[in-house]
Image (spheres, rainbow, N blue to C red):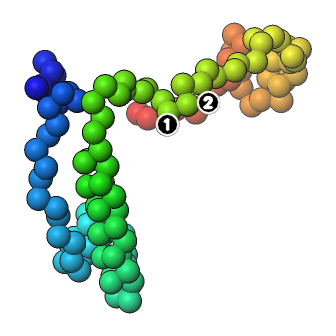
Amino acid sequence: MTQDNGTHTAEQPVANQATLHVDEHLVLRVAELSQLHIDTGDIHRCVQEMTQVLALVEQMRDVDTTGVEPMSHPLDGHQTLRADEITESDQRSVFQAIAPETAAGFYLVPRVVE
């Protein structure tokens, strides 16, 4: 079953796609697209690691999530914010006294874009 936005719901999982075969060519292509340099000696290790990552994704795809509510964040925590209190005195006149140019309380800077 798909929702109005085209995403699949938990009631009917997406059909398993064929597992991607990772080889040296794929690793080099991904590195090129990512603008990464991989040493020749590291290519075999990268093939193994990419294969392990894709196997984990495949394993996670097979987990039955029927009835599991989606989470926006795994911790469901709330950010504790500090109180919005003034902790410093207004020192604008002190700082602007040493500025090269000011006007009406603003710092004037040279024009950069014509």
Q: Which residue is mark 2?
A: 109
Q: Position of residue 92 (x, y in %)?
A: 81, 17
Mark-to-mark CA distance, 1 and 2 = 9 Å
Quarter-wise, where is residue 35 in the image? bottom left
Tell me the amino acid under the disc marked 1: Val
Q: Which residue is mark 1?
A: 112
Q: How many marks?
A: 2
Within-10-Å neighbours for mark 2: few <14, some 14–19, many 20+:
few
Q: Using the rendered image of the protein, determine whether residue 7 is visible from the camera's viewpoint.
A: no
Disc 2 residue type? Val
Residue 31: horizontal and vertical position, in percent? 30, 69
Q: Quadrant of residue 94?
A: top right
Residue 106 lies left or right of residue 70; in this view the side is: right
- For the residues labelled 1 and 2, say whether their Cβ atoms are less than 8 Å apart: yes
Task: Provide the secondary structure element on which disc 1 rests.
Answer: loop
Element carrying mark 2 = loop
- Say if 105 sits above or below 35 in the image: above
Q: Position of residue 20 (x, y in %)?
A: 17, 64
Q: Position of residue 50 (x, y in %)?
A: 32, 68
Residue shown at 34% from the left, 88% from the top = 40
Tell me: residue 40, above or below residue 63.
below
Q: Residues within 10 Å of mark 1 (few under 14, many from 20)?
A: few
Taking the spot 75% from the left edge, 11% from the top edge, the residue there is 84
The residue located at (26%, 73%) in the rendering is 27
Q: Residue at x 61, y 30 (%)?
A: 109
Taking depth in this image into account, of 95 and 31 the one nearest to the observer is 31
Assign the C terminus to one quadrant of the image.
top left
* Residue closer to the observer: 79 or 98: 79
95 versus 20 height, above or below: above
Name the image quarter holding the N terminus.
top left
Q: Nearer the viewer, residue 35 or 108?
A: 35
The circle on residue 97 is none
